[in-house]
Image: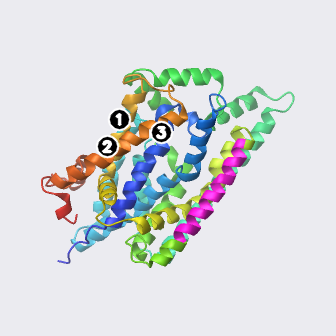
């Protein structure tokens, strides 16, 4: 039998950066109502520190960490498929069982803990992505670019609808239905009415059962997200497959090539996002322009930025260094760390925990992020020194294979 592919250190490192970055992106969604995620002005004009925090997060983190995580998900998915093939297993069966259980985890996460789950979405898109796993690199890139283009067109159409709906609702003698439709869309884009703000804050400060009931009726289900972000997620997964196949994600390219990609990709992304943030601020975070910024303008910028981030991480990594080792361990336990941050943050913010929901400023939310980052770095490596998998990685693997995986033994002495 051909040996299974060895674990690739660069994937764990990039995944570690991504899972830590996702917490920084999601912290506003933990600490505030959903409508505050895209704008710092949903509950009044932000203070200077809050505006700086939003602008920095928007330029550096928002959308990029999710994209980077999707990128790594595609690469890891391809590794699992290749490993099943060399082990004489049915790659489709192995992959689809993994996605089925990931969907179960995601739905439980969505309804029982937090409305912002991405796991169920990844499971659905990942199941579909299997169809493309055998394509050559150039086709993976081509189809991925087509997915990004499709997503951009879809979101641009939605933004055009928002501008048209706003115009209809603000005409003299506008129909009550047009006004109501605009207000409904505006709330989703961060411009809620005062009663909505009061109601959503009360929900977040309620008990666990109240929050479960609210998510059951209000949270976007996993299938709804397929139309909202599905093409983009699929595109990123295909880019991840291409990155693995081409050697980009395994560190096989020249340092000069990584440097060019890092500088070009990050430069284009940050300059573009800074310009978009300026548009948002100049228009007072009006719902139409929030939609234009977050949806239509930001989407085509993300792929180059994500490639730039991946190249930069590979360039600056110090194999064997304290930080590199710790971040890699956090990435190796990304599933456990992702759900672990949900448990910690919902306990801190929701009413059944410490009740900080809506009580901290946006800038102060990041004071919560740093200690959780440190916790990820401090616990992941010692755990993996003793056990082969993170706790949820072990459970996912065992359920997918219908057999309890061996747990004891250092993860650093095994390839899988």
Q: On the image, which quarter does residue 165 sit in?
A: top right
Tell which of 179 and 412 is nearer to you: 412
Residues under labels 2 and 1: Cα distance? 11 Å
Give the quadrant of residue 148. Answer: bottom right
SS state under label 1: helix
Q: Is the magenta stretch mostly helix, strand or loop?
A: helix
Q: Is residue 104 left or right of residue 137?
A: left
Q: In this view, does 393 lie above or below 368?
A: below
Mark 2 → mark 3, Cα distance in angstroms: 15 Å
Label 2 close to label 1 by CB (< 8 Å): yes
Furthest residue to the right? 172
Q: Residue at x 32, y 58 (%)?
A: 328
CB contact under 8 Å: marks 3 and 1? no
**Upstream in sequence: badge 2 or badge 3:** 3
Residue depth check, mark 2 versus mark 1: number of the one nearer the observer: 2
Residue extent of the magenta highlight: 261-281
Residue 366 circle label: 3
Seen in the picture, residue 217 relative to 315 is either above or below; the reply is above
Of residues 121 and 3, the one drawn nearer to the viewer in this rendering? 3
Residue pointed to by mark 1 = 344
Say few, some or many: other residues with alpha carbon within 10 Å of mark 3 (under 14 / 14 to 19 / 20 or more): some
């Amino acid at each position: 039998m051909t040996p299974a592919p060895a674990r690739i250190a660069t994937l764990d490192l990039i995944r570690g950066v991504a899972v830590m970055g996702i917490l920084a992106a999601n912290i506003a969604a933990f600490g505030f109502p959903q409508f505050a995620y895209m704008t710092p002005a949903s509950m009044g004009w932000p203070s200077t520190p809050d505006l700086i925090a939003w602008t920095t997060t928007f330029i550096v983190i928002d959308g990029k960490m999710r994209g980077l995580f999707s990128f790594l998900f595609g690469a890891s998915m391809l590794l699992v498929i290749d490993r099943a093939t060399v082990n004489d297993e049915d790659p489709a069966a192995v992959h689809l069982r993994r996605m089925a259980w990931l969907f179960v985890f995601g739905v439980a996460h969505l309804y029982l803990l937090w409305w912002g789950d991405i796991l169920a979405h990844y499971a659905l898109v990942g199941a579909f992505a299997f169809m493309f796993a055998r394509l050559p690199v150039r086709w993976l890139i081509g189809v991925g670019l087509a997915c990004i283009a499709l997503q951009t067109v879809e979101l641009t159409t939605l933004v055009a609808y928002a501008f048209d709906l706003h115009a209809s609702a603000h005409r003299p003698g506008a129909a009550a239905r047009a006004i109501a439709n605009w207000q409904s869309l505006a709330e989703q884009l961060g411009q809620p009415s005062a009663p909505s703000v009061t109601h959503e804050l009360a929900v977040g400060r309620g008990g666990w059962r109240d929050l479960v009931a609210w998510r059951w009726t209000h949270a976007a289900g996993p299938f709804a997200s397929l139309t909202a972000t599905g093409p983009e997620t699929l595109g990123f997964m295909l880019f991840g497959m291409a990155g693995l196949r081409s050697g980009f994600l395994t560190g096989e390219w020249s340092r000069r090539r990584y440097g060019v990609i890092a500088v070009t990709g990050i430069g284009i992304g940050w300059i573009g996002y800074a310009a978009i943030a300026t548009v948002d601020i100049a228009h007072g975070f009006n719902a139409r322009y929030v939609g234009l910024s977050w949806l239509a303008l930001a989407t085509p910028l993300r792929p180059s930025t994500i490639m730039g981030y991946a190249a930069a991480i590979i360039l600056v990594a110090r194999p064997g260094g304290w930080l590199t080792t710790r971040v890699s361990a956090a990435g190796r336990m990304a599933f456990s760390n992702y759900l672990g941050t949900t448990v910690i943050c919902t306990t801190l913010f929701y009413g059944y925990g410490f009740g900080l929901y809506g009580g901290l400023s946006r800038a102060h939310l990041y004071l919560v992020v740093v200690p959780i980052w440190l916790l990820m770095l401090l616990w992941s490596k010692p755990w993996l020194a003793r056990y082969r998998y993170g706790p949820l990685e072990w459970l996912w693997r065992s359920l997918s294979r219908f057999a309890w995986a061996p747990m004891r033994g250092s993860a650093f002495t095994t390839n899988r």
